[in-house]
Image (cartoon, helix red, strand yellow):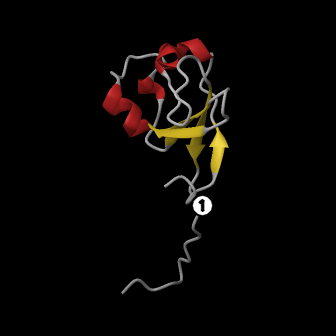
Amino acid sequence: MFSAMPWEPLILGLKFNIRLSDLEATDFMERVCPQCREVTRLATWQLHALFPSYTRLVELEDRMHCRKCGRHGKQAWSLWRAHPPLRVVDPRRDRN
């Protein structure tokens, strides 16, 4: 799911001000476990299914746990946004 499009880091402002409602459908959160270095990617729809839209992302830090080693607590996270490749449309091409 995540390898089909090019991704770019997303900066929405100060970390403690970002809420789930600020994320778009093409965004995802990537978190890294400090103990086992397991990388987990959570799509926006997955976060909205678990938490209300007014939830700040820093509030989720304490609720995070690693599925590989079971460590609970804060994990480093970052946001990413998909940028689909641009498709050049040829106006001379007939669309019959």
User: Horizontal and vertical percent for residue 41?
Assistant: 53, 40
Residue at 66% of width from left, 33% of height from top?
36
Q: Residue at x 46, y 37 (%)?
A: 24
Residue at the disc numbered 1: 85
- 68, 46: nearer the viewer: 68
Of 56 and 23, nearer the camera is: 56
Crowd around label 1: few <14 · some 14–19 · many ≥20 (10 Å): few
Count of all numbered marks drawn on residues in the image: 1
Q: Residue at x 56, y 32 (%)?
A: 69
Q: Secondary structure at mark 1?
A: loop
Residue 82, image x, y percentages: 56, 48
Which image quarter: residue 32?
A: top right
Q: Is residue 41 above or below residue 52?
A: below
Q: Quadrant of the C terminus?
A: bottom left
What is the x, y in percent for residue 68? Answer: 54, 37
Q: Nearer the viewer, residue 67 or 61?
A: 67
Say above or below: 72 vs 46.
Answer: above
Q: Position of residue 16 (x, y in %)?
A: 57, 12
Is the residue 85 above or below the residue 58 in the image?
A: below
Q: Residue furthest front?
A: 69
Q: Is residue 84 left or right of residue 24?
A: right
In the rendered structure, which amino acid carries the disc numbered 1?
Pro
Instruction: Tell me which residue sits at (59%, 70%) in the image.
Output: 88
